[in-house]
Image (cartoon, grey):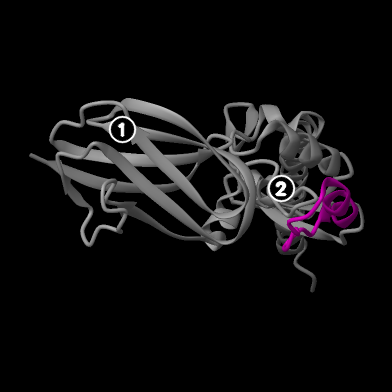
Amino acid sequence: MINFKKSLSIVMTVAVIFTATGCSDFLEGIASRKAIDALDSTLADFISDPASVVNVDDLDDNQLAIALDGFSDVTYSIDEDVKMNSSRDKVTVDVTFENVRVLNDIPVGTEEEVAEYIENASTNDVEVSYTLKRNESKWEVVDEPDYYSIFFEPYSRIAYIDENGMPTAFNQEFFDECVVAAVYYDPVMGNPLDRASISSPVAIQMVVYFDRLMYLPFTAELVKNGSVVQTIDVIVDNQSIANCDFSGQAYTPGTYTVNVYFDGGIVASEDITVAN
């Protein structure tokens, strides 16, 4: 004989389980949709004005302009298969950025050569995971990727050279490669100093040696105790040395530093001690 009461109880139990499961799935779907919409809004703001989101202070104006031009091709897509915790207040969402330029080895060249390299650079997709948490009824992104390293850092390596192979703006890698040494000389005997020390000098002389002929205007500063004592212009035209000669003052005892600059960047820097 069929036990109708028992059968009815089983049917009702199953119905409750399915109802609860369906309700949970429904609520999770709503939460997922709100989280995705919140992330989409955040990403849309980033794509439309990346410089307001990312610290791009390490780029000069020219580098930033080129980077933003390249970034204008970037698009994104959001994977709607999100991962949500049981309390439905935290989700992980995967995003794919498309058309990201691959600029691993930007050459040092003329403006035309660099522009051609960047224009013809390949692109790839970059996958990023975002975590969002619900704050009351609002979903917020709690961990953003390092946008600068992904989209902008390569452009910081843009450096141009002129027809003589000289940089048109300061480039640390260029000078690290071509500066051989910075040597102090005895202003009377004309010999290099064995130690960076001299007694009662009538002048302070430092020579910067390069591994190639240079065609650049430099500025040299003589600094003592953090204060600039003298500044001179050093024009190097078809030579492999830069003579930094400071004279015309009394150089009292203490530690001095000669800094040689090009376009605001330090090309060479050495200390010398002046004794009585």
Q: Residue furthest front?
A: 189
Q: For the view shown, which residue lies furthest in the bottom direction?
A: 1
Q: Which mark is residue 9?
A: none
**43 is higher (above) or lower (below) than 227:** below
Identify residue type, mark 2: Tyr
Would you say residue 110 sits in the magenta stretch?
Answer: yes
Question: Is residue 79 something that shows in the picture?
Answer: no
Q: Which mark is residue 155?
A: 2
User: Residue 272: image x %, image y %?
Assistant: 24, 46
Which quarter shows the N terminus?
Answer: bottom right
Residue with the mark numbered 1:
223
Residue at the image point whose x is 62% and y is 52% from the top? 214
Q: Amino acid at mark 1?
A: Val
Which residues, given as a range, are shown in magenta?
Answer: 100-118
Judge whether residue 174 can be spotted in this image: yes
Q: What residue is shown at x 34% (from left), y 44% (from top)? A: 205
Q: Residue at x 50, y 48 (%)?
A: 242
Residue under the image location 64 percent in, 35 percent down:
54
